[in-house]
Image (tube, helix red, strand yellow):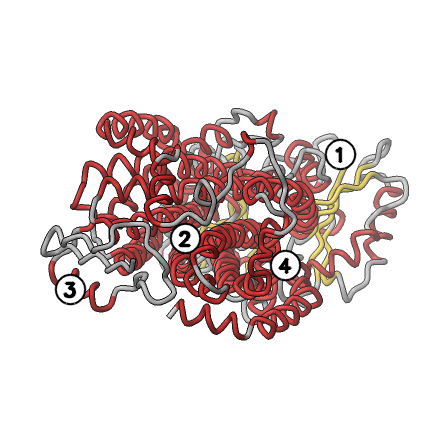
Amino acid sequence: MFEALGYQIFRWRRWVLALAGVFVAVALTWGTGVFGVLADGGFDDPDSDSARAEQLIAQTVDGPRPDVVAIYRSPSGDVDDPALRTAVETVLAGLPRDQVVGVATYWQTQLPAMVSVDRHSTYAVLELAGADAPARAESYQAVHDQLAASGLELQVAGSSAIFDEINTTIQEDIARAETLSMPILLVLLVVIFGSLAAASLPLAIGAIAVLGAFTMLRLLTEVTDISVFSINIVTILGLGLAIDYALFMVSRFREELPRHATVADALARTMATAGRTVVFSGITVAVSLAALLMFPLMFLRSMGYGGIAAVLVAMVAALTVLPALLAVLGHRVDALRFRLPGWLRLRLRLRRGRAAHGATATAAVEHGAWYRLAHSVMRRPVAYIAVIGVLLVAFGAPFLSARWGGVDARMLPEGASSRIASTTLEQDFPVNATTPIDVVVAGDQAGLPGYLDAVRAVPGVSSAEVIGQRGDTSVLAVGYADHWGSQEAQNLVKDIRALSDPAGAEVYVGGSTAQIIDQLGGIGRMLPWAALVAVAATLVLLFLAFGSVVLPVKAVVMNTLSLAASFGVVVWIFQEGHLSDLLGFTATGTLAPGNLVLMLAILFGLSMDYEVFLLSRIREQWDATGDNTTAVATGLQRSGRIITGAALLLVVVIGAFSTSSVAMIKMIGVGMAVAIILDATVIRALLVPATMRLLGRANWWAPAPLAAFWRRHGIREETGPGAGPTLGPATPAPTLDPATPEPAKALV
């Protein structure tokens, strides 16, 4: 199938490139407009107790939704000064009513919480027009320059202000990340390939993948909300995986060119081998990310949509546009060569020339550094497994002390205006003035006084007052001393929820702190099922690719160890605050749980990506030789440089996003970079050879019925007319076990 696709793309190469050009033009003109239609928030479970409380509060309490909190401060007067009141009310009265649909001030409500402790500041709450977050963002952008009052200092907080600044910062971060990473990637690709023509191909596919994923997201915004944070994942995965896939395809094409009489044959063989691997890798990563769609949080679903779009577009581009480019270039893929110092040459080709055939090529491969490393590891597999296992467990130990919190303005840099305003609200105004624990009592109100007394008696509660009542629904605002995202505040919410409901009424507890707890609950409910789907799909795909039930299980176990180690590093850095000065972020003492779930899905998929690359080459040698040790060593020799190069390039892409000003994106970037480095070095280069040496023939074992199924239906590389000489024995190795799939026959 893949070989036939290679011949078809060669035949229609110019049409493929023409259609790709049209697609890029549409993506540039329309797809990049996705930035203007993305939603903020999305961290709440819509079916949770806190979400129900928010709905009832909107129906019960008069007053605007706090989309914008404008803080006005008089250096000389206080809130009783008529001049301050006149200045504020004049500004608010002049705001366009088609953009601002509700306003509340201290002079209207007489709420003490709206006055600062020193009485020199007050804030106004503004509700913006718009049925959804993108529409309210447009309203905010239309009025934010009109909020300043003559003679008064202004600070602006609130959800719309915070997420507008986050959106702007993310766009700036993407531009900076691309500016930083692109030149470095080009230099590294030139070093790896030694040719400017070959080096430019992965970058071209990466650009198509990112633009294509933006277009897919723009289409999705027509039917569902997509979080602004998805843009970063699109760029990371789209650029990173496209470069990985292109690196694998181009290196294989250069390897196949001298083995075949025509460029078409070389391209067909490249598609039958590397193309097949790219398909399995892409599907495996996409399936891992698809597990995010099971979660109730819009933020995680958006990341799933964005990640799947990026992976699939990267895969399709690598299987269509890239082969078409290779078909046009042919032997000119090595054009514009660079002569580099010997110590910099990391050529992804067989040593002593790509024209080497048969035993000569095999001997060259077997004397490579990766081959020798594999044999060194396989001579002492137990020692390597023991040492690496202890190190990974030690790295992962901090994860046992992970504490969960919410996403707030502290994810922005210290100088961000909305963060400064949010800090002002917390420090200068009564405690939790804008983040109380909201308690809604719906139903018979006869028991309300007694319930109110019970809430006031809960340890940690500083105040509890009825702030709204309509019909059979009352809303209570509960004050407390701790930060709304702290563990103490979360325990307080749990204590209030543990109180008995008044007779004939139902109680719903909401607010920012309750949303954290409900977010954890929503994630906790779906995480086992999402993990089960991702793992089961991965096991099936790897079995179909390699015909073994042992290797997929081993891969999942090793990936789990690698993920645990990287999560431990994330806790050590971002929760405990180590390296915070160096990396430039504020440690809050907690982690947002959604971020860890996102990293879990992405890293699980990327780990399998490298696993497929490595096992494809090992399986190829196993089919040719039937010797497990030789297959592992030769497979590592032929893929080790590719995997290391791909990981290095991906770390450059992700490392650029580690410079993000948004702490949440920085955490994802740093955590993923650590995981990829561990995976491409410690796991693939050391742990995989060690475990495969211990398992021996069992690596390729499958129960007899499954082995028979794989022989009939497994998707594997078949040698055909375009395969060229196989770098193995002239005759197939004997079947070593009745349940072991017969090695594929090789042509001499």
Tell me the kind of residue under disc 3: Ala
The alpha-carbon separation of the residues under discs 4 and 3 comes to 70 Å
The quadrant of the picture occupied by the N terminus is bottom left
Position of the C terminus by quadrant: bottom left
**Point 87% across, 47% down: residue:** 87
Q: Local crowd at mark 1 within 10 Å, few (<14), some, or many (≥20)?
A: some
Please name the residue that numbered disc 2 is placed on.
447
| Residue at x 31%, y 63% (from the top left corner) | 719
Q: Dot 4: few (<14), some (14–19), or many (≥20) neighbours within 10 Å?
A: few
Sequence-earlier tag: 4 or 3: 4
Circle 3 sits on which residue?
A: 708
Q: Is residue 168 above or below residue 473?
A: above
Q: Amino acid at mark 4?
A: Asp
Q: Which residue is mark 4?
A: 62
Which label belongs to residue 119?
1
Mark 4 vs mark 3: give the one in front.
Answer: 3
x, y (%) of residue 676?
Answer: 45, 39
Quadrant in which residue 642 is drawn: top left
Q: Identify which amino acid the numbered label 1 is placed on.
A: Arg
**As rendered, which of 23 and 534 lies closer to the eye?**
23
- Going by the numbered disc 2, the residue's amino acid type is Gly
What distance separates the C-alpha of mark 4 from that of mark 1?
25 Å
386 vs 96: above or below: above
Q: Are marks 1 and 3 in contact (CB under 8 Å)?
A: no
Instruction: Kindly report the distance in space between the C-alpha atoms of the residues bearing marks 4 and 2.
Output: 23 Å
- Mark 4 near mark 2, Cβ–Cβ under 8 Å? no
Residue 426 seen by the camera: yes
> Considering only order in the chain, which callout, 1 or 4, is on the residue closer to the N terminus?
4
